[in-house]
Image (cartoon, rainbow, N blue to C red):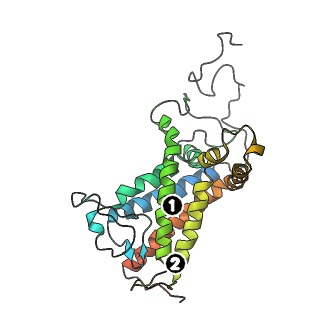
Amino acid sequence: MATGTEPHLNSGGVRTGTRAAIGASHLRTDRWWLAPAATAAGLLAFIVYSTWRAFANADYYSAPYVSPFYSPCLAENCKSMPSGPNADLFGSWWAISPAIIILIFPLGFRLTCYYYRKAYYRGFWASPPACAVAEPHKKYTGETRFPLILQNIHRYFFYAAILVAGVLTYDTVLSFRDTDENWGHMGLGTVIFLINIVLIWTYTISCHSCRHIVGGKLKHFSKHPVRYKAWQFVGKLNARHMLLAWASLVSVALADFYVYLLASGAFDDPRFF
């Protein structure tokens, strides 16, 4: 029962009179800072790379491969691409990179992802920097105020991510065609696209929102055996959500970089058949 003497949630972080009077910010003796530093470095590297590629507006198509950063291509300047899920919906008035149109959805999904929240809260904001390390900020409001309250729209970005994964699946199918649009082609790019789409799908459906959609609000699993089996499957993937988050982040960047190398003429796609 409240007595009126409890510290307010925002009154002073962990440095309050009701907490243990420990002068040190932590009592850990291991290199606890390595994990948040590595996380920050990895995310920063992806941010720099994806920003460069998103605004480059070039070298994003080399038949039959289209960069996952630019698909589906919805601007008029995508007409140079003879194949792929392209639709001139934005017309010629959209003068900047067509990647900007679509990247907001997968990036929004990742930015609001429960794992990525933990990653960049610790890596960039030190909130908190690690387990058993004091929160350095004087106030803590969680995700109850703007802009962090917008994290609650993660479930809606999940639906958009499903659509994007569907488009990338179509792109992967098209990667089995050669430059003359004949089926039966398989190159190194096809393998990269296959690995990428498997990781994209497993990361997407391992999402906490997906787990809730599949098995949430069920009072009796025994009455819903199909949903229960699906919930168990998603739960197993969810246990590896962190690994899948990083693996899919690397694979999507690798797929884009491979298309960039082909489109810029660095080398030709090695064919297996």
Task: Give the left or right position of residue 45, taking residue 227 as reference.
Answer: left
Q: Which residue is mark 2?
A: 190
Picture coordinates of residue 86 (x, y %)?
35, 66
Residue 101 visible in the snapshot:
yes
Quadrant of the rendered structure where residue 121 is? top right
Give me the C-alpha separation between circle 1 and circle 2. 16 Å
Front-lying residue, 194 or 29 = 194
Dot placed on the residue nearer the N-terminal end, 1 or 2: 1
Name, please, the residue furthest toward the top.
3
Secondary structure, mark 1, is helix
Picture coordinates of residue 65 (x, y %)?
43, 75
Q: Compared to 107, does 4 lie above or below?
A: above
Residue 253 visible in the snapshot:
no
Task: Give the left or right position of residue 141, taking residue 181 as reference.
Answer: right
> Which residue type carries mark 2?
Thr
The residue at the point 27 percent across, 67 percent down is: 77
Q: Which residue is mark 1?
A: 165
Name, please, the residue furthest toward the bottom.
273
Secondary structure, mark 2, is helix
Q: Compared to 241, does 84 lie above or below?
A: below
Q: Are marks 1 and 2 in contact (CB under 8 Å)?
A: no
Picture coordinates of residue 27 (x, y %)?
73, 39
Front-lying residue, 25 or 216 = 216
Quadrant of the rendered structure where residue 127 is? top right
Picture coordinates of residue 93 (x, y %)?
21, 57
The residue at the point 52 percent across, 30 percent down is: 144
Q: Which of pointers 1 and 2 indicates the residue nearer the eye?
A: 1
Mark 2 closeness class: few <14, some 14–19, many ≥20 residues within 10 Å: many
Front-lying residue, 222 or 177 = 222
